[in-house]
């Protein structure tokens, strides 16, 4: 495990990739050829689709999968060339050898909120959200295959808490030089201004 330069993203804009089903037909390869001013921040299973600048994991079941099982996700993790950042749960939690542990500033209800706060902590002042839907599409909970321990009903139960926490963040950045855009005009997350194109 190693430390990370928390000021390494100053002056850059962060593109944070969520898991919402609105990204099912999105061309993730476009994100690998962005201008240098952008840093791409994957969350949990983003590495299934492309190689983000960093990938944040805040799901202990995914950590166990990396450590003890073989799957499509673990294959993607093992071939991923970027930095793997993990929420530091502390205690007896085990991590992969290449893990970079990030100390949370507070408890986060979801990995998307954690990723935004990491981008802010590392110096970004302008952040773009992709796949922050806060709703399912039919039986689809995510753009990828989802998680064993989640279902449409379980996701719908947690969305109000997620939205409440994002509302808290939106209130706390008012009057600052921080700007957060949601790129999905159909998102149930309404606290950030909508702006579809970030290039």
Image (tube, grey):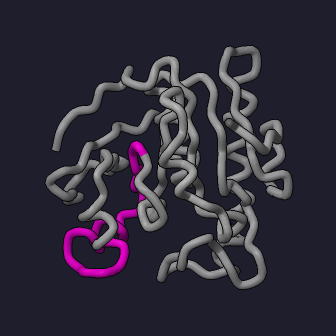
62 vs 108, left or right, is left
Picture coordinates of residue 84, whole percent (x, y): 31, 49
| Quadrant of residue 76 within the rendered picture | bottom left
Image vertical order of residue 86 relative to residue 22, above or below: above
Q: Is residue 109 visible?
A: no
Is 153 within the magenta? no
Image vertical order of residue 136 relative to residue 120, above or below: below
Picture coordinates of residue 105, whole percent (x, y): 45, 33
Picture coordinates of residue 106, whole percent (x, y): 48, 38
| Quadrant of residue 152 within the rendered picture | bottom right
| Quadrant of residue 57 within the rendered picture | bottom left
Is 69 within the magenta? yes
Image vertical order of residue 5 relative to residue 167, above or below: above
157 vs 113, left or right, is right
**Which quadrant of the rendered structure holds the C terminus?**
top right
Identity of the residue drawn at 26% across and 63% down: 79
Task: Give the total number of marks visible in the rendering.
Answer: 0
Image vertical order of residue 136 relative to residue 168, above or below: below
Picture coordinates of residue 55, whole percent (x, y): 40, 50
For the record, the magenta segment spans 53-74
Identity of the residue drawn at 39% across and 45% down: 54
Viewer-proximal residue, 170 or 45? 45
Identity of the residue drawn at 29% across and 72% down: 74
175 vs 91, left or right, is right
Identity of the residue drawn at 67% across and 34% down: 169
Q: Is residue 147 visible?
A: yes
**Which quadrant of the rendered structure holds the N terminus?**
top left
């Amino acid at each position: 495990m190693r430390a990370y330069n928390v000021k390494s993203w100053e002056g850059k804009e962060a593109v944070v990739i969520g898991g919402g089903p609105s990204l099912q037909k999105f061309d993730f390869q476009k994100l690998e050829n962005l201008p240098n001013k952008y840093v791409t921040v994957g969350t949990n299973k983003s590495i299934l689709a492309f190689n983000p600048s960093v990938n944040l994991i805040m799901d202990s079941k995914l950590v166990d999968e990396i450590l003890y099982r073989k799957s499509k996700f673990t294959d993607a993790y093992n071939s991923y060339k970027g930095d793997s950042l993990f929420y530091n749960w502390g205690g007896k939690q085990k991590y992969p050898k290449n893990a970079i542990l990030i100390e949370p500033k507070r408890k986060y209800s979801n990995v998307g909120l954690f990723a935004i706060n990491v981008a802010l902590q590392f110096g970004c002042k302008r952040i773009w959200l992709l796949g922050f839907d806060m709703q399912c599409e039919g039986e689809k909970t995510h753009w990828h295959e989802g998680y064993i321990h989640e279902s449409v009903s379980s996701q719908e139960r947690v969305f109000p808490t997620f939205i409440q926490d994002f509302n808290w963040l939106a209130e706390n950045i008012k009057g600052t030089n921080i700007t957060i855009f949601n790129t999905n005009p159909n998102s149930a997350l309404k606290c950030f201004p909508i702006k579809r194109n970030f290039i």
